[in-house]
Image: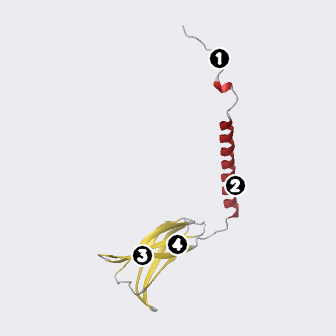
Amino acid sequence: MTKISRSSNIENAEPHWIEWLTGLVSAALVIVLITWIGKDALMDKDSSPDLEAAVVRTEQRSTGYQVLFEMSNKASATAADVTVRGELQDGKAIIESVETVLAYVPGRSKTRGGLIFENNPAGKTVVVKASAYNEP
């Protein structure tokens, strides 16, 4: 025969102070996140991407010289199909020009890519910039 316990269940007791503390901290985090997302949604005025490229390093490869770059987007708007143009210049003369396309550069983020030149960029100026993009 099964015995039925007549003692009180632990769930019927008053909550432990740790439960109250956990609930308060969780509620505070939820309020902070909702406020942060709401402020960003209401106050964000970026209507177009703000793209800026910087050369990271140059490496010699079997097919030429690879120039690694980092594209940053300082605005909150995302750019898609970003055309990146690289020029190898000696003074004001353009020696070589190459292009690549980045699939997308999210808002407030960075992405990396590479351009491959046939001529050695040592002693020359390498200019890398975004020349076009689409809105996703």
Q: What is the distance, in whole Å, between disc 2 and disc 4 at their CAs?
A: 32 Å
Q: What is the distance, in whole Å, between disc 1 and disc 2 at their CAs?
A: 46 Å
At mark 4, the secondary structure is strand
At x 45%, y 71%, the residue is: 101
The earlier-in-sequence mark between 3 and 1 is 1
Give the x, y percent position of residue 59: 36, 76
Mark 1 or mark 4, whichever is nearer to me: 1
Q: Tell me the crowding category of disc 2: few under 14, some 14 to 19, or many 20 or more residues within 10 angstroms, Cα based.
A: few
At mark 3, the secondary structure is strand
Q: Tell me the crowding category of disc 1: few under 14, some 14 to 19, or many 20 or more residues within 10 angstroms, Cα based.
A: few
Mark 3 or mark 1, whichever is nearer to me: 1
Mark 2 or mark 3, whichever is nearer to me: 3
Q: Is residue 36 above or below residue 25?
A: below
The quadrant the N terminus occupies is top right
Amino acid carrying label 1: it is Ser
Amino acid carrying label 2: it is Thr
Mark 1 or mark 2, whichever is nearer to me: 1
**Residue at numbered disc 3:** 57
Numbered mark located on residue 35 in the image = 2
Q: What is the distance, in whole Å, between disc 1 and disc 4 at their CAs?
A: 71 Å
Dividing the picture into quadrants, the one containing residue 90 is bottom left
At mark 1, the secondary structure is loop
The earlier-in-sequence mark between 1 and 4 is 1
Query: 129 left or right of 96?
Result: right
At x 64%, y 25%, the residue is: 10
Query: 125 left or right of 46?
Result: left
The earlier-in-sequence mark between 1 and 2 is 1
The quadrant the C terminus occupies is bottom right
**Residue at numbered disc 1:** 7
**Residue at numbered disc 4:** 133
* Residue 123 vs residue 49, the one in the foreground: 123
Mark 2 or mark 4, whichever is nearer to me: 2
